[in-house]
């Protein structure tokens, strides 16, 4: 089974990750998910990694410093095999059905079949396939990128790309629940939520990082901040 994996911005950041000491960049095969309640307030988080994926020591240390509500650590071993730990409970080896039952028993999701249609067109992992069978209490989204800076405030980034020119693109209404969820998570962790957008084309495939649009989600509205190229974005938001 083929899964969605990476994008041009994250790939370039990984090349200079040693310089970005305060920045969490998910490895290929790693995700930090935020689940919400009916009002899109953060309810629990799940740090998912495929077996043999190694995060930098910094990454796990900084994740442990975040206010993560109920927190799940999950390793994907195979198509339907997961190692799961909720908060300080003992680690369990589960299949997809048992994982869903564990979530239900811990009041993290509802019983029954899901009543919603997933927004994401492409699955990203074996866990994502199981998640699509869950009857979630509220929304779910992942943190694409974050910079941890307790002295000056943390920054959380939602990365977006499509065929639309940056000066014409605005966040889609269908994604508003995810923005509310990430915004609540950012506020809980003394941070701000930024939306980072760039254009991509398919034939031939190309992602244009020469004009990146930066917006901020504040008080339930999107505020345009600026346009930057890749180097300017890194210098301003990830290095300074």
Image (cartoon, grey):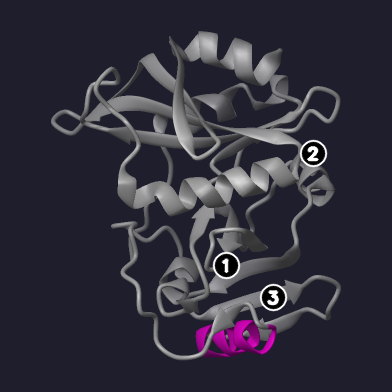
Question: Could you tell me which quadrant the N terminus lies in?
Answer: bottom left
Cα–Cα gap, marks 1 and 2: 30 Å
Q: Mark 2 points at which residue?
A: 58
188 lies left or right of 164: right
Q: Do the residues labelled 3 and 1 touch (CB within 8 Å)?
A: no
Magenta stretch holds residue 13: no
Q: Residues within 10 Å of mark 2 (few under 14, many from 20)?
A: few
Q: Magenta span covers which residues?
A: 96-106
Q: Residue 84 carries which label?
A: 3
Q: Is mark 1 on a helix, strand or loop?
A: loop
Choose the circle earlier in sequence order: 2 or 3: 2
Q: Kindly report which numbered mark, 3 or 1, lies closer to the viewer in this rendering.
A: 1
What is the x, y in percent for residue 236? 61, 12
Query: What is the x, y in percent for residue 229?
Result: 43, 10
- Label 2: state its secondary structure: helix
The residue at the point 83 percent across, 81 percent down is 90
Q: Name the residue under label 1.
A: 37
Is residue 21 something that shows in the picture? yes
């Amino acid at each position: 089974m083929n899964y969605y994996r990476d994008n041009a911005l994250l790939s370039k950041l990984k090349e200079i990750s040693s310089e970005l000491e305060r920045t969490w960049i998910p490895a290929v095969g790693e995700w930090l998910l935020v689940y919400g309640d009916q009002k899109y307030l953060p309810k629990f988080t799940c740090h998912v990694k495929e077996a043999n994926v190694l995060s930098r020591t910094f990454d796990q240390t900084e994740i442990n410093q975040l206010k993560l509500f109920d927190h799940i650590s999950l390793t994907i071993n195979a198509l339907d095999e997961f190692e799961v730990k909720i908060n300080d409970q003992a680690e369990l080896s589960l299949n997809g059905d048992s994982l869903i039952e564990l979530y239900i028993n811990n009041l993290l999701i509802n019983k029954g079949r899901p009543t919603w249609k997933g927004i994401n067109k492409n699955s990203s992992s074996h866990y994502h396939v199981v998640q699509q069978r869950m009857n979630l209490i509220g929304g779910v989204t992942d943190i694409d990128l974050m910079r941890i800076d307790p002295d000056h405030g943390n920054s959380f980034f939602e990365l977006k790309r499509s065929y639309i020119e940056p000066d014409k693109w605005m966040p889609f209404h269908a994604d508003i629940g995810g923005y509310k969820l990430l915004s609540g998570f950012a506020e809980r962790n003394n941070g701000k939520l930024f939306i980072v957008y760039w254009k991509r084309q398919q034939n031939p495939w190309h992602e244009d990082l020469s004009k990146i649009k930066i917006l901020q989600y504040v008080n339930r509205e999107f505020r345009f901040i600026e346009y930057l190229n890749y180097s300017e974005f890194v210098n301003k938001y990830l290095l300074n």
